[in-house]
Image (cartoon, grey):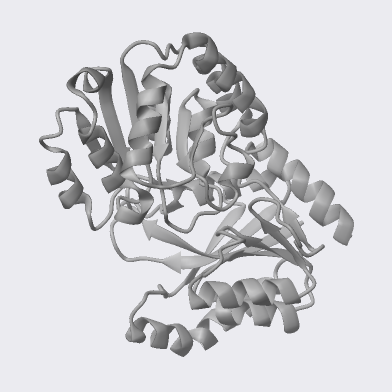
Amino acid sequence: MKLAIISHTEHFKTPDGTIVGWGPTITEINNLLEVFDTIYHVAMFHESKAPLSALPYVSNKIIFVPLPVLGGHSLVDKGMLLYKAPIVLATIRKTLKQVDWFQFRAPTGIGVYVIPFLSLCNSKPGWFKYAGNWNQENPPLGYGLQRKMLKKQSRIVTVNGSWENQPQHCLTFENPCLTDTDLTEGEKMGKQKNIEGKLTCCFVGRLEKPKGVERIIKAIGGLSVADKKRINVIHLVGDGPDKNYFMSLAKDIGVCFVFHGFLSRDKVFDIYRESHVFLMPTTASEGFPKVLAEAMNYGCVPVVSNISSIGQYIINNETGFLLEVVTKKELLKVLRHIFDLKQNKYKQMVELQRNIVFKFSFNHYNKHIISNIISKIN
């Protein structure tokens, strides 16, 4: 079987001519070769330098089909989105002629016209993957429109979490990020960690205020001198427009903050291996962050906001800690609680996490696709 994936995933070319793309998506597609013989990935090509988080495809059976870079918040950006629509749709139409199945990954700017095209002007079987917050009360206009269109059409839509009044064609699917090797190693690492010594904490994601980076730094700054001495280091992985502000804010806190920028998947996993606590006090639009499942796999205790589907997996004080009110004060309270956490309670948490992280494995995801999409449509 041949599959066309249509997305906004950023692709780049390295100096040696290799095409690379945003690591988590590329890894997911590489693993989909266990289900499909050939995969065409229709996505956006950037002329800029590839970040360290970008990865190559593992096989020439995955074929990259470039789209122009589209999207943004300005009126010019939105105008270009519509102006380039004929090119985008022509590229998709040509690719669909070469495949048996399609997957469209939403929400994204081009979705406002690609979803209607795939729903009304295409006879190939396929499904839509909605990676954002399916239950968001006040989504951006474009996201809300795409979600409404996906609810009204008949093809399968995979979503994060399980929701009241979820349409029958909308299926709960976890977003995969872990290999079987990762699962085996992670279980071993979790058994070796000790929560009662000096703690290493980490954050992985966009360095911006909505993701909670400022909240993390200010909460750490509010700890007593004795509590600060319990922290070995806080790793911040990622980049964003507010990075310099965060670096300045963290400078005189009295705790070691390390700003890594973008890192390769292997380097990010090294940080999970070292860390005891994963921090993400976010107010941003989230589905279920892959980094949360990755961190938990390596025995990190998550301290996360109770938004979107996160609270369906993280049970407060059982598999992690949920912030019902996302403030510096609440984060500070949870951090102090973690400092008093006993080893036996930590081990119990890590053990309970195993059933969760398994659901985010590529193996589980691929079997889910075969049994709940392909077999049902065929």
User: Is residue 94 something that shows in the picture?
Assistant: no
Q: Quadrant of residue 312?
A: top right
Residue drawn at the location 43% of the way across and 30% of the way down: 269
Quadrant containing the N terminus in the rendered view:
bottom right
With respect to residue 258, does 158 lie above or below? below
Asked whether, in this view, residue 332 is left or right of residue 23, the answer is: left
With respect to residue 13, does 229 lie above or below? above
Q: Position of residue 183 (x, y in %)?
A: 60, 25
User: Is residue 44 something that shows in the picture?
Assistant: yes
With respect to residue 26, does 96 lie above or below? below
Residue drawn at the location 51% of the way across and 46% of the way down: 289
**Viewer-side residue, 142 vs 308:** 308
Asked whether, in this view, residue 237 is left or right of residue 320, the answer is: left
Residue drawn at the location 37% of the way across and 74% of the way down: 72
Asked whether, in this view, residue 21 is left or right of residue 96, the answer is: left
Q: Quadrant of residue 99?
A: bottom right
Q: Position of residue 243 (x, y in %)?
A: 21, 50
**Viewer-side residue, 59 vs 288:** 288
Numbered disc total: 0
Q: Position of residue 5 (x, y in %)?
A: 62, 62
Quadrant containing the C terminus in the rendered view:
bottom right
Q: Position of residue 321 (x, y in %)?
A: 49, 33
With respect to residue 29, does 297 lie above or below? above
**Viewer-side residue, 257 vs 368:** 257
